[in-house]
Amino acid sequence: MIDFTMIKDFIMIKDFIVNLSNPSDYIDDIMKKYDDHMESIRMRFFIKYYPNVFFQRTLSFYRKILHNYPLTYDIVKDYFFLVKQENKLQIIIDRWRQLYKNKIFWTKNIMNQIIHLKKLKETILALFDGSKSSMYLHTKLQIYNREHVDQLVERLTKLFKLFKHNFFISNNINVILLDDFLYMSFSKMVEYCEYIFFKIIRILTNYINYFILYEIYIVQIENLINPSSDINIDIEDVSSDIDDDELCFIIEKEYY
């Protein structure tokens, strides 16, 4: 059953926040009229319409003034956390933008980008006969003959066309000339294909996970700044986190 009283309260609080003549005064005058529950709703609307003003104060500041309003403080703390994580992931996604120049991909929303990346991974698996089993092409070819060499060259050529030269260089993937590849022993050819294949699959898997996590944080932020009677925000539902040390490792060690 719809709680029309709650809806009315939401509308009144939203109008109050939207029509603030000086949003900064709200922070200084915080919690002089409402209980914790209503103040938390007011805070969520304030964050939505005045995020820059909200971030003029630190989390420590909010902790101090909200010590008697645990629900409202949880909203503030959750928003700080979510934005921090979103910003970290945005750095990684911007990095992918530099690596993956598919124009169609960057016109899609986040959900369809994830679908695209999963299909791309499936394409790579299928290219090496690994979409339905773990017996990849390069592990099946044990004996040298011209047909087997041609199969390996064909797959590598398709990979290079899919991702372009910059992708391999930026990810520190060793690229060799065709003449150098053909000069290798057949076992070394197989080893090189295995190296390229697993390197790309690992990179794609990581980015798929990053995009999924990014989508989760976006949804959580949207829920937080758009109050309604049927939304229950629980940051613990976001089980994955990226800490500062991990982010530094990702950016400095793996990709640069």
Image (cartoon, rainbow, N blue to C red):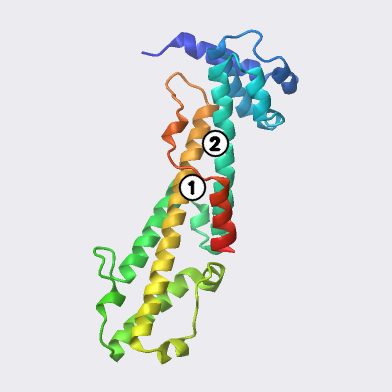
Q: Is residue 86 above or below residue 117?
A: above
Residue matched to label 2: 82
Between the C-alphas of marks 1 and 2, the distance is: 20 Å
Residue 80 percent across, percent down from the top left: 59, 33
Residue 185 is left or right of residue 16, and the answer is left
Residue 173 percent across, percent down from the top left: 50, 72
Q: Secondary structure at mark 2?
A: helix
Q: Amino acid at mark 2?
A: Leu
Q: In the image as oriented, which residue stretches furthest toward the front?
A: 245
Q: Is residue 103 above or below residue 61?
A: below
Residue at image point 68% right, 25% down: 61
Q: Is residue 245 above or below residue 221?
A: below
Q: Is residue 65 above or below residue 197?
A: above
Residue 132 percent across, percent down from the top left: 24, 63
Q: Nearer the viewer, mark 1 or mark 2?
A: 2
Residue 135 is left or right of residue 63, and the answer is left
Residue at image point 55% right, 72% down: 169
Residue matched to label 1: 109
- Residue 20 visible (yes or no): no
**Quick one: quadrant of the C terminus?**
bottom right
Task: Kindly identify which numbered label has been placed on residue 198.
Answer: none
Q: Which quadrant of the figure has residue 137?
A: bottom left
**Quick one: quadrant of the N terminus?**
top left
Could you say which is closer to the camera, residue 195 or residue 21? 195
Could you say which is closer to the camera, residue 198 or residue 17? 198
Residue 66 percent across, percent down from the top left: 62, 18
